[in-house]
Image: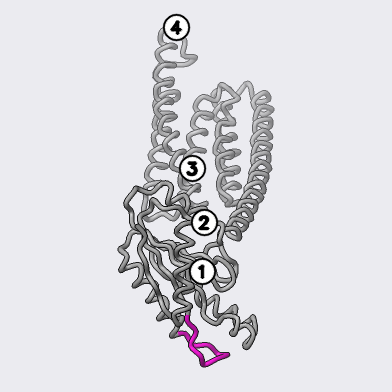
Amino acid sequence: MDELKYEVRRKMVGVLKYIWLAGIIAEIIFYLVLKWFGDYGMDEREYLVKRCFLPIIFFSLSYYMAYYIDNSKKTSEDRKNYLCTLSLCIFGACIGIFHGYFVPLWISPVIAVVYSTVFPDKKIRMNILHYSITFCILAYVYRFIEEPDNIVTYTVNLLICVIIIIVTCISAVVVQNYNTSLLAATHEYYSKQLEYRDRLEKDALTGVHSRSFFKENVEKYLKESVDGDVVAMTILDIDNFKHINDTYGHANGDIVLKRLGEILNSEEEGIMPARFGGEEFVLFMTDRTAQEYKAIIERMLAEFYAGQYDFTDEHISFSAGIVTMKSRHEYTELFNAADKLMYKAKASGKNMVLEEGLE
């Protein structure tokens, strides 16, 4: 959310730059047009001061104020949000005050009121609302000084403009609250979707990938990989796990499964672990040599075997079969080969890792 507010503020400063340039060009064009017709409504020098020089000076001050603040490293983000919004409000006020003979321009600061709703800080919004009304009153006073005979008309216009500013602020807040609620609902929806996806992708007990996620991604890798890449499929099965469940209970059996899941998940990139079912796990490994693949599984076995449990003094191990091959093989072929090798390790005494290469 902070990054979004930062981006919105930077874009506002960028837009203010173009409005600043456009304002300067517009003041010059208006002057030249009126000079062509010879009707300024006042002395030419007075027009240049009131309608050109003063607006351009305040336009420039408001823009450079926003630019400097936005790039300041000493100013907090909340302070930047407030002062940059105030700069936009001042810019609108200059239009309303110095060109107040167009009464609708008195409400120009309302742009900053709408913009302030981007930030959830109520203090910013209320301050900008107060400044907008104040600048509207200044535009009224400025017009009264120039045309004191139209006091009634301008007073009525002032009341209308203030009401418009307040209503606009209230409407902007209502829209902001609606958008905030909509955003919260959307966030909740996607959070649930991510949670649901995690349930599909992850085994809830061990934290490793699910069987379906593993199969889908390994098949995709084998299909898209370059011919000749050496990969490895490993199947491992906890030794005597039925004995653990029957003797110490399923709750303690779950502790063993979680322990193995933690070990499988602790390895670096290029290793995808998954729980295939019960006490059987499967791993797919890439970007290594056959010797490195076997060394990784043997390290896992040593760590798992060294584990200590409150419910038993026995060491618990697993048997594993590793098949290394070129990635052109099919998923089912690799899985079946690794599965057979795992059972061979079981039959050979358990607590071991057997490795075999496929051509």
Residue placed under numbered mark 3 in the picture: 8
Q: Main secondary structure of the magenta part?
A: loop
Q: How many marks?
A: 4
Specify the amino acid type for callout 1: Phe
Mark 1: few/some/many CA within 10 Å (<14, 14-19, 20+): many
Mark 4: few/some/many CA within 10 Å (<14, 14-19, 20+): few
Residue 72 seen:
yes
Q: Nearer the viewer, mark 3 or mark 2?
A: 2
Residue placed under numbered mark 2 in the picture: 215
Disc number at residue 281? 1
Extreme-bottom residue of the structure: 313
Q: In this view of the protein, which residue sits in the foreground, 93 or 268?
A: 268
Q: In the picture shown, does residue 103 fall above or below 350?
A: above
Q: Is residue 130 left or right of residue 352?
A: right
Extreme-top residue of the structure: 37
Residue 202 on image: x %, y %: 56, 62
Q: CA distance from mark 4 to mark 2?
A: 81 Å
In primary-sequence order, the first of circles 3 and 2 is 3
Assign a secondary structure to mark 4. Answer: helix
